[in-house]
Amino acid sequence: MKRMFLFIFISYLFVLIGCSPEPSEKVSRYQENNEIIGEEREDLIGEISDTIYHSVDRSNSDAEELMISPPDRKGESIIPSEGRYTISAGVFEDPPQSGRLLVYDENEVLLIDELLDFSYGVSSVTVDLNGSHTVHVDGLDQAFLTPAATEISNELTAGIWEVGKDIEAGSYAVIPADFSFGYLQIFEEGELPRVFEFLNSSPESAINVQLQLKDGQKLKISRLEMLQFEEQS
């Protein structure tokens, strides 16, 4: 009798295993490569500024160093000349500053929304400004815009980067330089944006995302101080 019950129980387990549903595409994509798709991706990306697909003159002939010094904590906005800039705050001051950086296009669509904070945000953001973008800082005593030189690198910080100009096309394993939480978004005209999540709290939990990058793609790194791109054969 016991053997009969054991046989029935084992048979029942096999039936349950055989009938268990396959994981959804959303779950599979995240399990395989930490890629977010579906409604959650749309929520994270929000409305897309068309200017993310555009490039500025990297010679920075019109770019100039600027300082934003709001008269109060409610913030201040400026429209810088065309160029590629690194935007930072006095995060290394004592005590460090902390505030919000917003960059809008001429249609008031957000291109950048970051917290400038050495401990809980990023220390700087690098981005193309086309001469009609509005830069707004809130909660900071000062923010600095510095023309950014262009060079190929496998270490990219927070901001927007172009494959072929800032990093070479190719196959990469991507990992954060520190143990933090944030996103890498990939934009390519005519294609749906892709979003990859990095959530690391210790060396043992370091996430390794596999990517194939193509010339002309734009990479938007958000909430992460730096991503390392390790070339794969």
Image (spheres, rainbow, N blue to C red):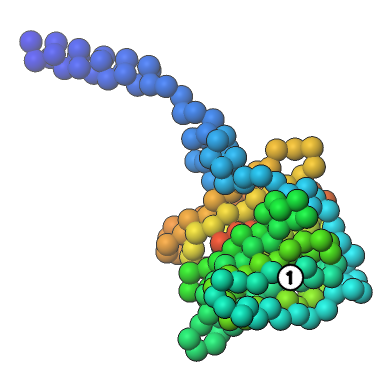
Is residue 85 found left or right of 229 in the rendered image? Answer: right
Is residue 233 found left or right of 46 in the rendered image? Answer: right
- Residue at horizontal 37%, vertical 16%? 19
52 above or below 82?
above
Picture quarter with the N terminus: top left
In the image, what residue type sits under mark 1?
A: Ile
Is residue 170 visible in this depiction of the protein?
A: no
Is residue 159 found left or right of 82 in the rendered image? Answer: left
Quadrant in the picture for residue 111: bottom right
For the residue pair 134 and 40, the one nearer the viewer reads as 134
Disc 1: which residue: 78
Residue 132 position, x and y percent, is 81, 61
Quadrant in the picture for residue 157: bottom right
186 above or below 155?
above
Is residue 7 visible in this depiction of the protein?
A: yes
Residue 180 position, x and y percent, is 49, 63
Residue 211 position, x and y percent, is 67, 49
